[in-house]
Image (cartoon, grey):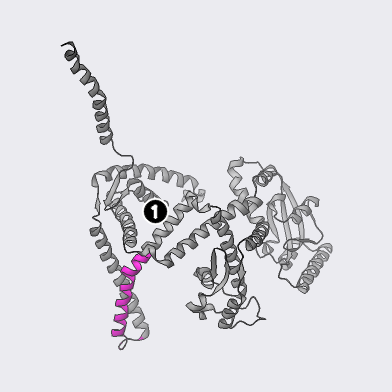
Amino acid sequence: MRKNRHRPFRSNVLMLPVLVFCIGFLLHCNRPSPNPALAAFDGGTVLEAEVIDHYLLSTQYKPKVQPSEELFHEIARQKALDKMMVKEARAQGLAEDSLLQVLVRNQERKAVFYKYMRQEIISRVVTDSLIRLFYANYTPQYAMRYIIRPVVKSSTPAFARSQKDTIEIVHRLLNSGEKFEDLANRYSQDITTNRKGGDLGFVIRESLGDASLRAVMDTLKDFTYSKPFRGYEGWYILYKGEKRVVPVPAFEAVKDRIWQTLYRTRKHLIRQQVERRFEELSEKYHYRFYPASQKILWDKVGVKNNGSEYQVVDFSALTEQDLSLVLASYDGGLIRAAELFENRKREPQTLLDFTERFTALREQHLLGQHGLESGMQNDPEIVQQIHSFTESLLRSRLLQSAVKDPANARTDSLRQTLAPREKPEELKKILGQKYFEFERAGKAQFEEQLLKKYHFHTLDKNFSRAVKEAGRRKEEQNKKTEKSAPAQTRSK
């Protein structure tokens, strides 16, 4: 009987932890999420943070655009559509398309290449110690000018001699009393400084990228000019002017600016590093160039063997078959002619453009391949970048097949109907307007289909909190933007 008397007590003791857990669980469930969903659909959500970030980014320079539930409903809807399009594209098998996969791999290699350049090439030239050296010599600064007659690798011996002869003539004119600024304006071939009398501004020795320039600057007295001397980019005469002592700002305040200056002035050293690395990797990856393929292209666009590298070339004559030609290969990939024409804004216009684009492309391939082999593609930043690129590509392919292709088909059908009775210019105008209408209507219809298919809906109870939080952050953003704006802009 004594044992039975204590049994209820033990039972209550055992139930106590369960009761505490249940109360804690209920309290946790009732606590609002720090990042609640504003919209949901089959297989996904749109979170508050996504909507607020989109709003702040799109209104960064629009301080008067305040958040509202109506605006946030539209943003949430568009965010959801972007995600549903990716799901639909994958469901239709577009992610398995071999061409799309090639584009993704190429983009990954490019992203790795840029990281490789920063980490393996540029950092070996623009070192932390060089940045510190620049900062240590931040003051005094000197007003420097120069006159340059460039000589490059491709210059002929005759041209190099003529440049040397010219700079010596300039030196004699200086000795006869002519002004440095006037001679720089007449003879210097640096288009960024010659109209300013060769003015480089106030600089320190480390601001000058060429070691020859730095050495000559050290030997010059104030308000004197040098004898002609050979530097990395040609023949120079350097002038050292006024000296000024300036306050030295905190290192962190100027570190990035110093890096930019060193990167700009050391580009020739960076180029040397790239060329050496390319030669090493050419052997490692068995790089091979195919001149026969290039000759096919040259013949197609009418380029002669002795043609000038500055000759303007009409590459529009090249067909898809021509562009599929392999110009080079290596262990890990091929370089096709089409890659030189991917960026329409940077398409080659001359033989020199073509050569420079191909040189940059082959370096990108081999250095990028080495980066891939080193595992740089696993860097979180690159992973996210490729993820975003892939999703953007999938959406583009889906819209092409679901919206743009049908709009093109309807426009072509209309063209056949209108062509016999409309003038060419009027027909072009009508068809352009009709295509725009077909595409807009098709896109709206397709989006509605996706919203229904994936059961899109908004979670209205969460919007007021999101708008309030966005309003707070917008106020902070406006204050930061106002502080960073130039004084004359704020005074308006």
The number of numbered badges drawn on the structure is 1
Tell me if 220 is positioned left or right of 484 in this view: right
- Residue carrying label 1: 58
In the image, residue 96 sits, relative to residue 58, either above or below, namely: below
State the SS at label 1: helix
Residue 260 showing in the rendered view: no
Extent of the magenta region: 396-423
**Among all residues in the image, which is located at the extreme top?**
2
Classify residue 446 by image quadrant: bottom left
Residue 161 showing in the rendered view: yes
Residue at 24% of width from left, 20% of height from top?
Answer: 13
Answer few, some or many: residues within 10 Å of disc 1's Cα (few below 14, many 20 plus, some between 14 and 19).
few
Tell me if 232 is positioned left or right of 454 in this view: right
Give the x, y percent position of residue 457. 24, 52
Q: Is 401 a magenta residue? A: yes
Residue 478 or 489: which is nearer the viewer?
478
In the image, residue 173 sits, relative to residue 34, either above or below, namely: below
For the stretch drawn in magenta, what is the main secondary structure? helix
Residue at 34% of width from left, 60% of height from top?
Answer: 90
Give the x, y percent position of residue 103. 46, 64
Residue type, label 1: Ser
Give the x, y percent position of residue 196. 68, 61
Residue at 24% of width from left, 59% of height from top?
Answer: 453
Residue 50 or 485: which is nearer the viewer?
50
In the image, residue 351 sits, relative to residue 224, either above or below, namely: below
Q: Is 469 a magenta residue? A: no
User: In the picture, which quadrant includes the N terminus?
Assistant: top left
**Among all residues in the image, which is located at the extreme left?**
1
Residue 249 or 28: which is nearer the viewer?
28
Give the x, y percent position of residue 437. 29, 71
Tell me if 348 is positioned left or right of 157 in this view: left
